[in-house]
Amino acid sequence: MKLGIGFAIVFLAAVNVAPAQPQQGQLNSQAAAKKAVYQKSADLARQQYFTCIANSSTSGEPPNCQSYINDAAYYDAMGAAVTNSGDVPAATAQKLALQRTVANTKFNYTRSAQIARQQYSTCMTNNSTSSVPPNCQSFLDAAAFYEGMAAAVTDSGVVPAATQQKLTLQRNNADTKFKYQRSAQIAQQQYEACLKNPNAAASTCQNFLKSEQAYVALAAGFPDPLPK
């Protein structure tokens, strides 16, 4: 049985018809809608930043609000990267997400360094009237550590394990060296006070001197700390 000519024409037409494609105007509308969503997120992040700053205005610590600014920058960039299809290319989205992670990680380390320096200043102020050498150096050593960590953050938002281990060792060495140096200073003060005491035995004074020399020798076994 043969097919009719009319049926054959309809059949061939159905086979060769391509799926309907979105029009350019529809694509631009999708892109505009997606851009608007990112813009709204960016504006909200900026509002959260200003609220955070206002709420932190009476705090003595550096405000912990930077992540909102980093979010705003991320959403602004995502909006700018939206294509006419209403999407952000996967590689671009991944790159921008990593940039936000890097910015947040660097800020966290930098803020920790600022707090450590504030703690150092407070410690020095509280010990300004003490005759004993102030025990505040560890805060400066912590600040140097956090600043080193911030500088070492990679494009993937992490600090390499070897670098972190090195910075931790430098911090521990600096802390230990300072403890020996401070102990030597205290022993020296005790030695000088002993010499001025007419009732002190010479052997007692000599022991203070020996302690000072021993601590100086121990401190010399550690490298000088990083510049503060």
Image: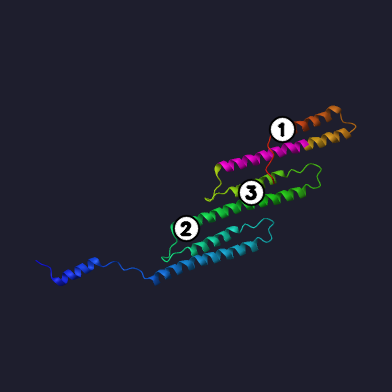
Pointers 1 and 3 in contact (C-beta within 8 Å): no
Tag 1: amino acid: Leu
Residue 175 is tagged as none
Residue 24 locus on image (x, y percent): 39, 70
Residue 147 is tagged as 3
Residue 45 belongs to magenta span? no
Asked if residue 124 lies left or right of residue 166, the reply is: right
Residue numbers of the magenta segment: 162-184
Please identify the residue farthest to the left as the structure is shown.
Answer: 1
Q: Which residue shows up at 76% across the image and 48% down it? A: 124
Mark 1 lies on a secondary structure that is: helix
Q: Separation of disc 2 and disc 1 at Cα?
A: 53 Å
Asked if residue 187 lies left or right of residue 46, the reply is: right
Tag 3: amino acid: Glu
Mark 2 lies on a secondary structure that is: helix
Q: Which comes before the other along the chain, label 1 or label 3? A: 3
Q: Separation of disc 3 and disc 2 at Cα?
A: 29 Å
For residue 217, what is the image quadrant?
A: top right
Q: Name the residue under label 2.
A: 93
Residue 142 locus on image (x, y percent): 66, 46
Estimate how packed mark 2 is, as few (under 14), some (14 to 19) or many (20 or more) residues with alpha carbons within 10 Å.
some
Q: Which comes before the other along the chain, label 3 or label 2? A: 2
Please identify the residue farthest to the right as the structure is shown.
Answer: 198
Q: Separation of disc 1 and disc 3 at Cα?
A: 27 Å
Tell me: residue 212, above or below residue 134: above
Residue 218 is tagged as 1
Type of secondary structure dominating the magenta stretch = helix
Asked if residue 38 lies left or right of residue 228, the reply is: left
Q: In which quarter of the image is the N terminus?
A: bottom left
Estimate how packed mark 1 is, as few (under 14), some (14 to 19) or many (20 or more) residues with alpha carbons within 10 Å.
some
Residue 181 belongs to magenta span? yes
Tag 2: amino acid: Ala
